[in-house]
Image (cartoon, rainbow, N blue to C red):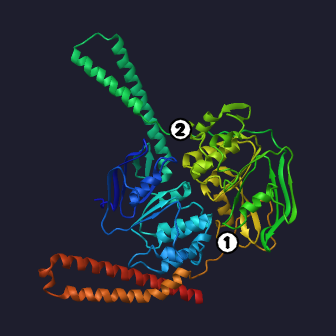
Amino acid sequence: MASPPVLYLKSIKLTFGATPLLTGADISVGEGDRITLVGRNGSGKSTLLKIAAGMVEADDGERFVQPGKTVRYLPQEPDLTGFANTLAYVEAGLGPGDEAYRAQYLLNELGLTGEEAPAALSGGEARRAALARVLAPEPDILLLDEPTNHLDLPAIEWLESELKSMRSALVLISHDRRFLENLSRTTVWLDRGRTRTLDRGFAHFEAWRDQVLEEEERELQKLDKRIEAEEHWMRYGVTARRKRNVRRVELLATMRREKREHRGPQGAVRLEAAQADASSKLVIEAKGVTKRYDGRPIVENVSARIARGDRIGIVGPNGAGKTTLLRLLTGDLEPDEGTVKLGVSLQMQTLDQRRDSLDPETTLADALTDGKGDWVVIGEEKRHVIGYMKDFLFQPEQARTPLSALSGGERGRVMLARALSRPSNMLVLDEPTNDLDLETLDLLEEMLGDYTGTVIVVSHDRDFLDRVVTSVMMAEGDGRWTEYAGGYADMVAQRGAGVVARGGAAKKPAGDASGSRTAAAPATPAKNRAKLSFKDKHALETLPGYIEELTDKADRMRKQLADPQFYSRDPKGFSLVSAALADLDEQRSRAEDEWLRLEMLREATEG
């Protein structure tokens, strides 16, 4: 028999203005569930998660959380105002009985010290602090809204591992396919205000979604035929009894209303790049390129030859210099040493990571037409700006909306629309997947597959890299870069490891030519060495005291249960203490096993 849910939402309804956002959304979360919540941008996923967290009240419907269960919610834009530093912010999220050491441990794992002042944090650093805050208490239910945003690959892969090891039930919203495939066991699809549930992970979602939409289309076609038949009867049928006629008129009116009120799937993004004449065969030739900042090498003696049609992915941890390498290769930044030669007839379009080229006061229509009227020219095709806006899921009434009023996802679509409307034979994409929904990512990948020019992309999205690029330039540390043939998974197979955080990058063997444009030979994994992490060392020091505390509690409970009058006096209390004692014994057994494992690891390290 299935255990009762620890949290559920039933028949949730919510309207913003005159538009219904949620019209009957349900979610049921059981112990240890791994649920991903998917849907188009603007479908109400974040709002539904806030309702689950108790932060937004629905117009109608039911929300239930089992008494005593803890819920933690990760917002997209955390607020650290009022805290002295990041450690104070994370510690404020701990409850009675939570392990205090986890605050510092998680901050360290996420690349923070705990001393950072909130006012000086970047968006990515604030996001990491917020992650530490919700993970530290190890709550019963974790509600995570885009947890991988602003994280680099080492942090994303660490987060995956951490979430897998936790007992918390998870509800995730993310555009990172690989992250969802690795963690989810149930998929909830929010579509046109209602939810559908697939009792399988995200890897099976897209085939199921397509099947649902095909069935819906067939039902709509059947409705059309029924309406056509009833209209024919109304015009030409022999008059029958008046009562029957009234019934059929009412039936026709009901079917017409059903068709009129049917909300089809949200319009699909239409992506098509305006392509210029082909560039020369050699697009970029870099020889011995070096760039240093404050004496620290970011790019050190890198050479590369990029030919027409190549698709190059640039990967590495935050701070490794990915954007710097990109700017050097495209001629946007002068190297300290070495040369970069660009091919002839090169027409380059760039999607920058921070959307810096967008003037926040410019209207949406002017951003797409450069303020030159109402038409967008794509190749040889001239299209009205309103029609082009619709291709990217914008409504006609948004034409005069300033860009400052758009969401992050909408600004991302504006940048895509601008870049793809201009003739190019080379696309430079710096974190193009930020804030894009899964369907838009699908179409972007298809468009890049059909694009005949050259593509250079910086991304932390492993699935996107595997689908798009033909080779990967990997930051090896100390300014060294190596190119590997294939996508991200191919790079991991050849190198023997994925992207690691700065300071932990694998060293290249002596004599290896830095930055050579050849597929690297498969790396030989280093021998496994016993090593105690910060968490292990802290646990080794604190576990004996914790075990002793559990032992004392268990002894007191045993004395209480030894009282022959206890059961007859309070049968319910006797049952509760017995259950609590069994739980304490299990906790102590696990703690003793963990201490023994760590003690053996310590001895191996010292040996």
Residue at position x 38%, y 78% in the image: 96
- Evaluate whether residue 166 shows in this view: yes
Question: In the picture provided, is 408 more to the left or to the right than 353?
Answer: left
Crowding at dot 2, Cα within 10 Å, few <14 / some 14-19 / many 20+, comes out as: few
Quadrant of image for the N terminus: bottom left
In the displayed structure, would residue 314 be above or below residue 114?
above
The residue carrying mark 2 is: 267
The residue carrying mark 1 is: 502
Asked which secondary structure carries label 2, the reply is loop
Q: Amino acid at mark 2?
A: Gly
- For the residues labelled 2 and 1, say whether their Cβ atoms are less than 8 Å apart: no
In the displayed structure, would residue 332 be above or below residue 209?
below
Counting from the top left corner in percent of width and height, residue 282 is at 84, 49
Residue at position x 26%, y 22% in the image: 247
Counting from the top left corner in percent of width and height, residue 375 is at 69, 33
Picture quadrant where residue 93 is located: bottom left
Asked which secondary structure carries label 1, the reply is loop
Residue situated in front as seen by the camera: 602 or 543: 543
Q: Amino acid at mark 1?
A: Arg
Sequence-wise, which precedes: disc 2 or disc 1? 2
Crowding at dot 1, Cα within 10 Å, few <14 / some 14-19 / many 20+, comes out as: some
Counting from the top left corner in percent of width and height, residue 425 is at 77, 43
Quadrant of image for the C terminus: bottom right
Residue situated in front as seen by the camera: 58 or 37: 58
In the displayed structure, would residue 172 be above or below residue 225?
below
Picture quadrant where residue 72 is located: bottom left
Between marks 2 and 1, how big is the CA–CA gap?
42 Å
